[in-house]
Amino acid sequence: MATLAAPRHSAAPGAPLGGLAADVFLRRHWQKKPLLVRQALSGFAGPFTLRELMALAQRDDVESRLVVRHGARWTLAHGPFRRADFGALPPRGWTLLVQGVNLVEPAGDALLRQFSFLPFARLDDLMVSYAAPGGGVGPHVDSYDVFLLQGFGRRRWRFGAQDDHTLMPGRPLKILRRFTPTHDEVLAPGDMLYLPPHIAHDGIAIDACTTYSIGFRAPAATELAAAFLDFLRDELDLPGRYADPDLAPVRAPAAIGPDMRRRCLQLLKGMTWNRATSARFLGSFLTEPKPHVFFEPPRSPLSPAGFAKSVTAHGAHVDRRTLLLYDDTHLFINGAALPWPAEGAATLRRLANDRSLGTRAARELPPEAAAILYNWYCDGYVQSGVA
């Protein structure tokens, strides 16, 4: 087995790609081949302790899993957990995985935003896993890109491309039946491994450790098509109704006749869409919050004038849970599409890209754009002040 993984890079201060330019990374590695970055974030040990991760795993608005391995036997439990669930864990061989940490913790969101050289529409979430020595989830493949950033402790990663993705039967996890890694690397705090989709990999904790997984969205074609059909169901208003005024007596009443097929297909031909409809669907789909995400409107909302005064004095920021994207014709926020206002588009684009507005930019908002921002504030999507 090779001990040298993909090309290595040593990090420049603050560079998540170890000094490698983003365009070079995308050209050479993105969805093509792995990259190992030593000290991607120098001095990084992760912002979360085991106690904090256990607290998050007890919340009903946070997705979490607990994986325990006893020899060849695996068990999988889904949260929310109780504190007592963690008291009976063995000293080795278990992993706690907490999904969407960026949605509930400022430090998680800040870490995810370090990867803003990639489109927000592709960024999914930050998962933090704590593993006791020997802990892991078994050899597997993912259908999406992932950056695996090591927090405290050490984890051994074995990985490589393989064609056989057959799974072991009767397991609660998708574990490969055969695993033939070609690379073997130990990641220390601050090291990072990028893996493109469908690269088989297995991470086993050497010490008690945390791993920060920056994952990406890659919807399956079937998922996209099903969501589009749901979108069209609300968009379409087909005229007409089935009618057969020239119906004649039939000898086989159970048969669907050719005339009925023709008439029904003729009605369905009215189900059409254009590029604008498809684009509006895509923005709405990409900003649709996950089912467990809810927003909390302010209990005592400011008046429009009071909100404008607050934003002018303190700026504004997008809530961590808010998904805000745009294209040439619409703003998309948490599943809703909104046409661009006549004025203020540049400032709203800045809010979408930077996730915040300074006081100077806030003072420049024309009335229509200011009204949009106020409505988002009332919905809990945006807050005044610095995040």
Image (cartoon, grey):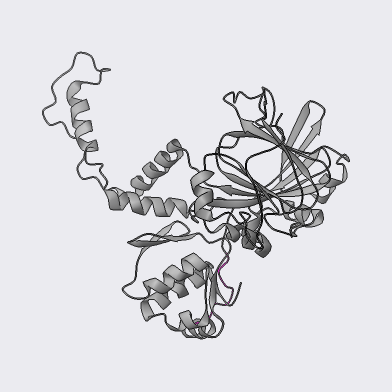
Quadrant location, the N terminus = top right
Residue drawn at x 82%, y 51% is: 83
Q: Is residue 292 above or below residue 302?
A: above
Choose top left, top right, bottom left or bottom right for residue 155. Answer: top right
* Residue 383 x %, y %: 55, 73
Please name whichever residue, 267 or 221, is drawn nearer the observer in this view of the structure.
Answer: 221
Left/right placement of residue 184 relative to residue 249 reads right
Choose top left, top right, bottom left or bottom right for residue 91. Answer: top right
Q: Name the magenta segment's main secondary structure.
A: loop
Left/right placement of residue 224 relative to residue 300 reads left
Residue drawn at x 76%, y 57% is: 45
Determine if residue 30 is in view: no
Residue drawn at x 81%, y 49% is: 153
Please name whichever residue, 82 or 183, is drawn nearer the observer in this view of the structure.
Answer: 183
Left/right placement of residue 286 relative to residue 111 reads left
Determine if residue 358 is in view: yes
* Residue 24 x %, y %: 51, 51
Q: Is residue 236 above or below residue 333?
A: above
* Residue 278 x %, y %: 33, 49
Quadrant location, the C terminus = bottom right
Q: Is residue 68 above or below residue 300?
A: above
How many numbered badges does the structure rendering display? 0
Residue 80 is one of the magenta-drawn residues: no
Q: Which residues are magenta?
A: 296-304
Residue drawn at x 54%, y 85% is: 313
* Residue 240 x %, y %: 19, 42
Residue 297 is one of the magenta-drawn residues: yes
> Outermost residue, top direction?
251
